[in-house]
Image (tube, rainbow, N blue to C red):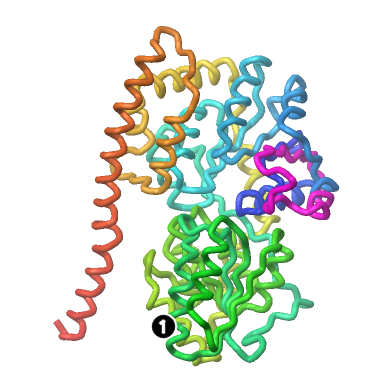
Amino acid sequence: MNNRIFIVSNLSMGGVESFSYYLAKSLGSKGHNTFSINLGNVNPADERYLDSISISSLNEKSKIISRSTFSDMFSDISPNDLLIIPMYARPFLEELHQLVKKYKVSPIVFGYLHGMGTYYYDNFKEFEPLISKFISVSQLGCLELKTIFPKRIEDISFLACPSAINLNESDDKLVFSEDKLNITFIGRTEDSIKGVFRLPQIINELQKKNINVKFRIVGNGPDHQELVERIDKLNLRTIEVEYILDAKTPELVKKSLLKSDILLLLSNYEGAPLVIYEALSCGVIPLSYDVGNVASTIQHGKSGMVYSIGEISKVATDILQLNSNKNELLEMSKNALNRITELGYNYDSYIKHLNNLYIESKKINPKKAIELVDRNTKLKHSNLNRWIKDIIPPGIIHKYYISHYLQNIKKAPQLKIEGVNENQLLDSMKIELKELKEKYSELNEFHDSVYTKMPYLWLKLGSLLRKLNL
């Protein structure tokens, strides 16, 4: 990768942003000519915006440029330059499409699937001709991409994001700090995604057992105040809760992890939560719902625990078990460190994989790519129902973000498409949206009954049969 590398992100905290930040710094440290393109979706007044020290540190290794600066530089773009983009960044993809059309040249493009949202697959489908390599941070996402794009299987790879946190010899990793079990939640305090209102339920279960525990809730978000109020109503006696709102970088997150025994991840959905890798890297035992890449990362019962989404009592029971058995906790902590070493999720290894993908990449034919993207755009707006069925084919149920995705389509400005009456198109889309919402409501219910409830019932039945020696 001797040419320029452009990495699209926001100068803010978050899993995708943290990955982009450290990838840019790591590539810059190795002498690559790296540029960080700030999408500008988060302004400096926002609580999520990175501090000036972090931005200065990034700028030393990777030149920070705006979207408009990237557009100005595009007249000099090389077919050997590399553009790395998270595929949720639709406005940037649309701008890239127009730049390639204008200058008749395209860089090599790596498109990243960071989550399981339907809008990711929509963007992949529409802009697929401009994408050189599809990279999923989860194995499940990789399989879904291969199902949707059977003719591009050789271009689809699973590549787990590395952890920016490592346990050094000089680090003072505390176990049972302050003579009590320390449990940490790290993430945006937003219940619809992160399930933060399950925290008071778990805390309440533990309070009934009168154990001495400290909870650290690291992060901020739209549901922070309500979360505080729900916890306050519990009138805690033996359980202490600390809120840390300013841990915007992995270095600050690490300070909390060094004082932690257990990490809780209670999300309703994730792609590949970096916080799990960060916890393992600090010898912290992750107790997580089975979302995204979690089940293939955590060895259940050895380096952490994995639960069905929504389980509360089982989580509390396992916390009580670890609290009463320090030897088991120490053994699992050691296993957590061994697990992240075994997985090899570090930036040196990651950059080697990226370099290999770059070497394999075929240069984009800009004229052909633009023709195909234009065709995809017309197909999407002329037959939305067929389009949705293509990005959510039989056997794949993207239950997450479907309603959000459909709402975005409804709000999207109408494009002027030759030969199509815009009023008729809007009326047609409204009808199709209604049908699709009804269809996916049924599919979600089917998914929950077959894939969520049934395995649990079969496990219960299996347990009963074993007890009866049948």
Residue 453 shown left or right of residue 35 in the figure? left
Looking at the rendering, which quadrant does residue 458 occupy? bottom left
> Badge 1: few (under 14), some or many (20 or more) residues near its Cα, within 10 Å?
some
Label 1's element?
helix
- Vertical placement of residue 231 versus 387, above or below: below
Q: Nearer the viewer, residue 354 or 402?
A: 402
Q: Front-most of 306 and 180?
A: 180
On the rendered structure, is 418 left or right of 333?
A: left
- Which residue is found at the position 62% from the left and 25% from the top? 95
Q: Nearer the viewer, residue 329 or 310?
A: 310
In the picture, measured across the screen, residue 322 lies left or right of residue 143, that is: right
Report which residue position mark 1 lands on.
Answer: 317
> Magenta residues, as a range?
30-57
Q: Position of residue 121 (x, y in %)?
A: 45, 38
Indicate the quadrant where residue 306 lies: bottom left
Residue 319 image position (x, y, % from top left) = 48, 82
Query: What secondary structure predominates along the stretch shown in magenta?
Result: loop
Within the magenta stretch, is there residue 95? no
